[in-house]
Amino acid sequence: MPLAVLAALALLLGPAAASALDAAGTARVVKEVDDRQRNQGDWKALCYMEQKEKDKTDVIYELLVFRRDQDDKQMFLFTKPKAEAGKGYLRIEKNLWLYDPATGRWERRTERERIGGTDTRRGDLDESKLVEEYDAKWEADEKLGVYSVHRLMLSVKPGVDVAFPVVRLWVDQQTSNVLKRQELALSGRLMRTVYQPRWRKIFSPSKNAEVWYPEEIRIFDEIEKGNSTLILIKDIDLRALEANLFTKAWLESRSR
């Protein structure tokens, strides 16, 4: 092979090889993503979800999100619109339950449940658990707009229940915030694309450090083209919650 061709290949391959993350480096990136969002205590937030569906009127939902991260518990309580008020989800012991005050019944749901009929999944409003749920592999370092990012491919670990078994992440190299996320079925079919363009931080007394969270989440349904959900996370409160909040009785009492 001519020397000129070899030199050209060296220029092309050299930077990519130098920037490639090995297994240990990839693991550090994923751990940093989790650690920045981990609170180690209780969490309360007011969330707004705007659901857009093709040929339908847009619907705006308001809900309260409660978390107790140390015990892996989570509660959603819808407050608006009126037709959804009092409806809620409770996650305890890795089981997700839906409560409908109109019938007074509880129904078990999977991680693939569309929260409130939107494109949102439960995990969109939880802390990041990538290390616990996925095995990660580095794909490339590249540009996402003006941001330099690590592009990672994640595959679900055996026996773990998640909404999507394969996930591709674009992680900002400077902040370790996830800017873009593609979620795929096992077949490789693209199901959702998620953007998290705005991140904020708040001091956590339980962690004694700052906790980062996406203030804005934009979800695009790749199956039902034209459908999308905008999530805005507001009014974060990290004070301890009521001891009995994460119970079916507490959620039932909100609709009486």
Image (cartoon, rainbow, N blue to C red):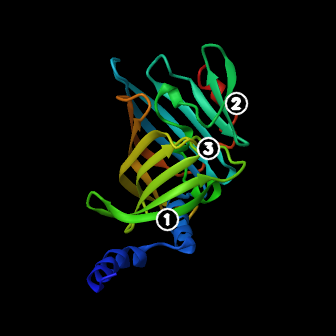
In the depicted view, which residue is nearer to us: 211 or 164? 164
Place of residue 106 in the rendered image (x, y in percent of width and height, measured from the top left): 69, 23
Place of residue 164 in the rendered image (x, y in percent of width and height, measured from the top left): 56, 43
**Front label number (1 vs 3):** 1
The residue indicated by pointer 3 is: 162
Mark 1 and mark 3 lie on one chain; the one further toward the N terminus is: 1
Q: Label 2: state its secondary structure.
A: helix
- For the N terminus, the quadrant is bottom left
Taking the spot 56% from the left edge, 57% from the top edge, the residue there is 39
Q: Residues within 10 Å of mark 2 (few under 14, many from 20)?
A: some
In the depicted view, which residue is nearer to us: 119 or 41? 119
Taking the spot 55% from the left edge, 51% from the top edge, the residue there is 127
The residue indicated by pointer 2 is: 248
Identity, as a three-letter code, of the amino acid under mark 1: Trp
Taking the spot 50% from the left edge, 25% from the top edge, the residue there is 117
In the depicted view, which residue is nearer to us: 223 or 35? 223
Identity, as a three-letter code, of the amino acid under mark 2: Lys
Q: Label 3: state its secondary structure.
A: loop
Taking the spot 63% from the left edge, 27% from the top edge, the residue there is 98
In the depicted view, which residue is nearer to us: 210 or 152? 152
Q: Distance between the residues labelled 2 and 3?
A: 23 Å
Mark 2 and mark 3 lie on one chain; the one further toward the N terminus is: 3
Q: Is residue 143 left or right of residue 251?
A: left
Q: Is residue 208 visible?
A: no
The residue indicated by pointer 1 is: 138
Residue extending farthest top: 103
- 255 in relation to 162, above or below: above
Q: Residues within 10 Å of mark 3 (few under 14, many from 20)?
A: some
Identity, as a three-letter code, of the amino acid under mark 3: Val
- 148 in relation to 95, above or below: below
Quarter-wise, where is residue 150 in the image? bottom left
